[in-house]
Image: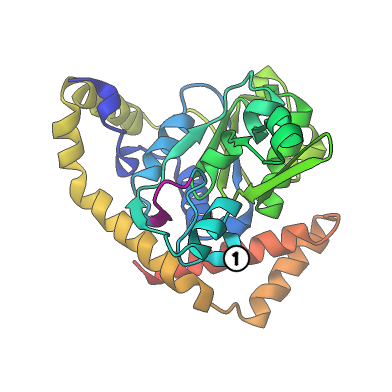
Amino acid sequence: MALDRYSYPFTAIVGQDEMKLALVLNAINPTIGGVLIRGEKGTGKSTAVRALARLLPEQKVVEGCHFGCHPEDPEDWCLDCRERAASGSLPSTTRRMRVVELPINASEDRVVGTIDLEAALKEGSRRFEPGVLAEANRNILYVDEVNLLDDHIVDVLLDAAAMGINTVEREGVSVSHPSRFILVGTMNPEEGELRPQLLDRFGLCVDVEGIRDLDQRVAIVEKRAVWEDDPNLFYQQHAESEQSVRSQIAEAIATFPEVTLPRQILRLIAQISIALEVDGHRSDLVCARAAQAKAAYDSAD
């Protein structure tokens, strides 16, 4: 049986609790701003990212939309969905969130998309070939070895993540579309660091290391052996725990907007930022959003 038919279960990952929590919190509240996972190879970074997608609830999308627009959220519709809605035809369907991977050698056009300038100039039409940022809308955008990406490409990704919109301009022709995604970057510090200006743009940053506990290391080998031998059986063995976490995340997503942080928590966040001499106020906002998501997640347990 092919291994790639089954993602390794999120709940079967041994240890790495901080990494798993950071991913879950971003899934609950994407406005946290993504997560950068730093660590040596073989520490489960990629496995955890791909496993997370299977735990997220299905979402409504406009059928046939390149950007996966939500049929009940007209403010975020792309131009095509607006035109279809105006004509009275906007059928919807459901889909599961997926992990969209950005190739390390991706060009800017591959990332943002391309405009057919000939059609624009001759016919006055805006023909747009969607890029990775279109595929990533309402999904997880995974960038492995983000520290090795061209700095300009990283800037483009982070700008889209912050604005929720991707705008492509060529020769006076402009096309915009929604681009809201959960940004996850992974890197091995031994292969080069990320510029401080870019590091600051990720909401959360987690350092992961190889597990040193004897029993946990043995458990990792045992679990992997079972999964490689029979992925279907292994997944069924973890089906109950997967469903439990899936339900917990779904409830947290539904309830976190109602969570209000007490003033003393906000003061604590501010005190920590002051003590660490953090520049600006982004850290305070991210901490507050993460605390809000954590409270919703814990209350759903």
Give the answer, above or below, for where 246 lies relative to 143: below
Task: Specify the amino acid type for callout 1.
Answer: Glu
Front residue of 137/212: it is 137
x and y, in percent, of residue 68 in the image: 47, 49
Q: Provide the residue designation for mark 1.
A: 75
Report the residue at 42% width, 70% height from top: 254
In the picture, measured across the screen, residue 284 lies left or right of residue 139, that is: right
Q: Is residue 140 above or below residue 278?
A: above
In which quadrant is the C terminus drawn?
bottom left
Q: What residue is drawn where x is 61% and y is 21%?
A: 104
Residue 122 or residue 245, whichever sits in front: 122
Magenta stretch encompasses residue 168? no
Q: Which region shows up in magenta?
A: 60-65
Q: Nearer the viewer, residue 109 or 90?
A: 90
Per the image, label 1 sits on a secondary structure element best described as: helix
Numbered disc total: 1
Q: Is residue 58 visible?
A: no
Q: Is residue 238 left or right of residue 82?
A: left
